[in-house]
Image (cartoon, grey):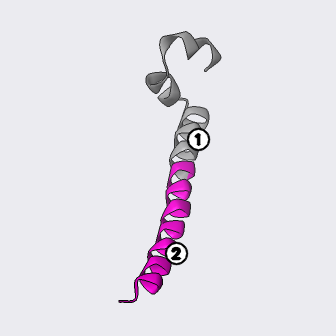
Amino acid sequence: MGWKAANELIGTLHIYQFYLLGAVIAFHAGFHIWRHIALRDNALRIMAPRFLHRFL
């Protein structure tokens, strides 16, 4: 039935999805850090718990 070939195809697809998700997460975090530093809009302060505000 070709299950081995299908399994290899799906495995390859999941590898690319994993790295794409990591890139999206890194971009998202980088964007919010940029907003916090460059625009000084307190974007991180809005998301962080109150006890961490003194570090932001």
**Mark number for residue 12?**
2
Q: Is residue 50 magenta?
A: no
Q: Is residue 28 above or below residue 49?
A: below
Q: In this view, does 52 lie above or below 10?
A: above
Neighbours of disc 2 within 10 Å: few (<14), some (14-19), many (20+): few
Q: Where is residue 16 in the image (x, y as percent from the top left)?
A: 52, 69
- At label 1, the amino acid type is Trp
Give the structural element (helix, strand or loop) at label 2: helix
Q: Residue furthest front?
A: 1
Q: Nearer the viewer, residue 20 or 53?
A: 20
Alpha carbons under labels 1 and 2: distance apart: 33 Å
26 sits to left or right of 9: right
**Mark number for residue 20?**
none
Q: Which of 49 and 3 is in front in this view?
A: 3
Quadrant of the image containing the N terminus: bottom left
Task: State the extent of the magenta-drawn residues as a range.
Answer: 1-26
Quadrant of the image containing the C terminus: top right
Neighbours of disc 1 within 10 Å: few (<14), some (14-19), many (20+): some
Give the structural element (helix, strand or loop) at label 1: helix
The residue positioned 50% from the left and 79% from the top of the image is 8
Residue tagged by mark 1? 34
The residue positioned 60% from the left and 37% from the top of the image is 38
Indicate the quadrant where residue 7 lies. bottom left
6 sits to left or right of 29: left
Q: Does the magenta stretch include residue 2?
A: yes
- At label 2, the amino acid type is Thr
Q: Where is residue 27 in the image (x, y as percent from the top left)?
A: 54, 52
Q: Where is residue 23 in the image (x, y as percent from the top left)?
A: 55, 57
The residue positioned 47% from the left and 80% from the top of the image is 9
